[in-house]
Image: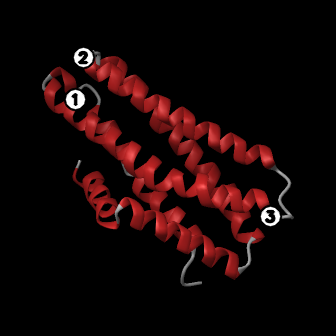
Amino acid sequence: MENNPIKVMYDEHEVIVRAEKIIENLENTWENNPEEYADKVKKLVEFFREYADGYHHRKEEEVLFPAIKDHPDFVLQEIIDEFMEHHEGFREYAAEIIEAINEKDYVQSYKILKRYINDLLDHIAAENEELFVLAQNLMDENQLENIYFKFKDIDMELGESRKIDFEKLINSL
């Protein structure tokens, strides 16, 4: 299938997962260069807020989740609610990380960042292995194509070039 929204979801997950290595490499770097550490963490949080939440989670929350919930064969409403709760938790993590950075509590910021990425990786694995497979099995090709074009609308509204800039940013950190 050419216009596959599930492939878009998998591809965006691959970009988001790249943050794990960056976070691992940040451990204790604040000891030698706190300004550089703070700058990188702020860029990571911007990436999480804008790319992971703005582009990716928005597609799930506004398009994919409702399409799945509205499907007559779908009966596990609580799985969608759980993923929505995860998204809220990720937003809270981002705020806590920035708060710790602003207070120059770099050890705490790193602890929160590690919890964030670990929870995010678990979340991504669950979506990849359960939700996306379910969506692909529930939806016919026309429904999937409709979802794909709604995803494209979100990218155009938020800025396709900005999305590419975030993908480049995560590769440059």
Question: Which quadrant is the N terminus positioned in?
Answer: bottom right
Amino acid found under the numbered disc labelled 3: His
In front of the other: label 3 or label 2?
A: 3
Q: Amino acid at mark 1?
A: Ala
The location of residue 11, given as percent across then percent down, is 47, 65
Mark identifier at residue 104: 2
Q: Which residue is mark 1?
A: 38
Q: Earlier in the sequence, mark 1 or mark 2?
A: 1
Q: Is residue 156 left or right of residue 58?
A: left
For label 3, the residue is: 71
Of the residues shown, which amino acid type is indicated by label 2?
A: Lys
Q: Is residue 74 left or right of residue 142?
A: right
**Disc 1 to disc 2, how far (Cα)?**
8 Å
Please provide percent x and percent y for residue 14. Answer: 45, 58
Instruction: Find out whether the residues at labels 3 and 2 contact each other: C-beta distance under 8 Å.
Output: no
Q: Residue at x 71, y 48 (%)?
A: 80
Q: Nearer the viewer, residue 149 or 9?
A: 149
* Disc 1 + disc 2, Cβ < 8 Å: yes
Query: Tag 3, which secondary structure?
Result: loop
The one of 4 and 115 positioned closer to us in this rendering: 4
Single out the mark in the foreground, 1 or 3.
3
Q: How far apart are the alpha carbons under marks 1 and 3? A: 45 Å
